[in-house]
Image (cartoon, rainbow, N blue to C red):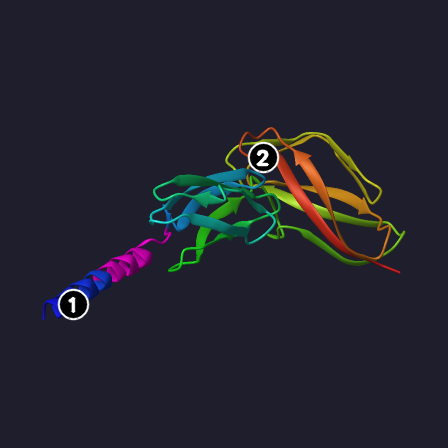
Amino acid sequence: MKRFFSTLTLFIGISAAFLVSSANSVIAQPKLAVDSLTVNWGLIYAGALKVSHIALKNAGTDTLKILHVQTSCGCTTVKPSKPALLPGESDTLVVQFNSAGYQGDVKKYVDIETNDPVSPAVSVKFFGTVHSILEPTTFSSYIWLGAIPVGKGFTKSFTLRNTSDHPVTVKAEDAHSDKLSFKAEQQTIMPADSATFTFTLTPQRTGVEKENIFLKTDDAMQAQVLIPIVFTGVQ
């Protein structure tokens, strides 16, 4: 009987140790905590860079590994965080959005992949409204020229309207490349008034391409106006 109780005691001890070990192995795991899953950029003046800081923290009990951080488009960049966070450790993701070429409501995402067994993928949403002091009357964020024969100059005009409550002066600006010829004379555009600009584009090869026109202004909120031009060179 004594031998039986000794064996039973040993069995209970081993079982208890196994249960404690198993419990610890379940509890010891990483956990990603993000301070906010949505960021409202509010009003963004076209051409401005919007920078946000996202706080990350390992709220678990094991090392959190940052496996991959990806943005939804090339206009949004993110500076890499630490590759791993110890339990209780924090870090910051710096997210930057370039609003050049955008108009109206925008939504961007940053996806974070970790070794968190419960939530291995977390997506942070960024949103705002891009506004232009000098707004294209077409309400499009770019000029589409369609198919243009290679080597043949194509002349096109675009009109910008002053949406502000004060005069805006467009400074003289020259922009030349092997494809694009553009010259804007200095002029002041009154509120609710508009001005028209003309450029000539000559494709040098076949395929879809993009050129940019940059206009400088005296407005502190939008010192530069970007006009993207998209076209297809054809034979």
Count of numbered circles in the view: 2
Task: Answer few, some or many: residues within 10 Å of disc 1's Cα (few below 14, many 20 plus, some between 14 and 19).
Answer: few
Q: Quadrant of residue 133?
A: top right
Write down the residue under mark 1: 8
Front one among 103 and 67: 67
Front one among 198 and 46: 46
Task: Answer few, some or many: residues within 10 Å of disc 2's Cα (few below 14, many 20 plus, some between 14 and 19).
Answer: some
* Relative horizontal placement of residue 106, taking residue 214 as reference (left or right): left
Residue extent of the magenta highlight: 16-31
Q: Identity of the amino acid at label 2?
A: Met
Please state the horizontal and vertical placement of residue 14, each as a whole percent of the image.
24, 62
Tag 1 and tag 2, C-beta contact below 8 Å: no
Residue 38 shows up from this direction: yes
For the point 15% across and 64% down, which residue is it? 6
Front one among 108 and 217: 108
Please state the horizontal and vertical placement of residue 176, each as a whole percent of the image.
80, 37
* Relative horizontal placement of residue 234, taking residue 166 as reference (left or right): right
Write down the residue under mark 2: 190
Q: Which mark is residue 150?
A: none
* 181 in relation to 185, above or below: below
- Gap in Å between the C-alphas at discs 1 and 2? 94 Å
For the point 38% across and 52% down, which residue is it? 30
* Relative horizontal placement of residue 151, taking residue 44 as reference (left or right): right
Q: Quadrant of residue 185?
A: top right
Q: Identity of the amino acid at label 1?
A: Leu
Please state the horizontal and vertical placement of residue 235, each as a whole percent of the image.
89, 60
